[in-house]
Image (cartoon, grey):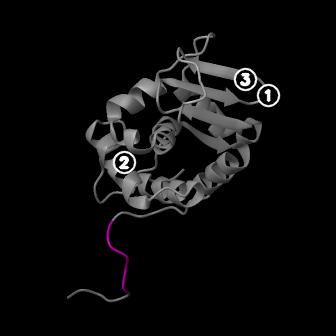
Amino acid sequence: MATASQVVATLSRLLSIPHGRLIWARDQLRAARLLPNAQGQAVDLIPRQISALIIAALLGELGAYPQVVTRFMGLRNRHGTTLAEAIDGLQKSPGQLVRLDVNTDGTAAVVTDGDTTHYGEADFDAVSRIATVGGDKFKQLTEAIAGAPQLRAGRPSEGKKRR
């Protein structure tokens, strides 16, 4: 897995989102305890925490508000599965995702993975602001996160011994 900083850098690069905005969202999610607050330590994220960062990235500026991210994570489909659980599952098999749409005006999301599954009550209409991640980008994202190099906590060794 990857650390929060590695996930932020990957999301920023692949989704063309300003790095600073994602850092701000990451820090807000840490303050709300949705992400581990391990300053100076390399802590790998679990899929649920990565899902929170993905949702925050798709929500744009609203992603810096933990209560909004939490509300989106808890959206349920008609079978009772939450959006966070769906994204967790897609991280394990990213090739299934065709597209993920998030309506940033309302509280709704659509996951297309062979079937189209609606999360939340609101419908998408012509004036909805929709953030989309295609299946190819999502697959690149999950591969980059899975292949992130292992980080060590502390300062890198400079090859000198201290006296």
Front one among 65 and 128:
128
Quarter of the figure that contains the C terminus: bottom left
Tell me the residue that label 3 is attached to: 116
Question: Is disc 1 surrounded by few (<14), some (14 to 19) or many (20+) residues within 10 Å?
Answer: few
Judge whether 157 appears above or below 79 on screen.
Answer: below
Question: Is disc 2 surrounded by few (<14), some (14 to 19) or many (20+) residues within 10 Å?
Answer: many
Along the polypeptide, which appears first: circle 2 or circle 3? 2
Judge whether 161 appears above or below 102 on screen.
Answer: below
Farthest residue in the right direction? 114
**Residue 102 magenta-highlighted:** no
Q: Range of the magenta residues? A: 154-158
Tell me the residue that label 2 is attached to: 26
Q: Which residue is drawn at 32% across and 89% down?
A: 160
Give the amino acid at mark 1: Gly
Q: Residue 15 carries which label?
A: none
Tell me the residue that label 1 is attached to: 114
| Label 3 SS | strand
**Residue 157 magenta-highlighted:** yes
| Label 1 SS | loop
Q: Report how many numbered discs are placed on residues in the image.
A: 3
Q: Which residue is drawn at 57% across and 27% down?
A: 109
Q: Which residue is drawn at 47% across and 27% down?
A: 73
Q: State the CA–CA distance, disc 1 to disc 2.
A: 31 Å
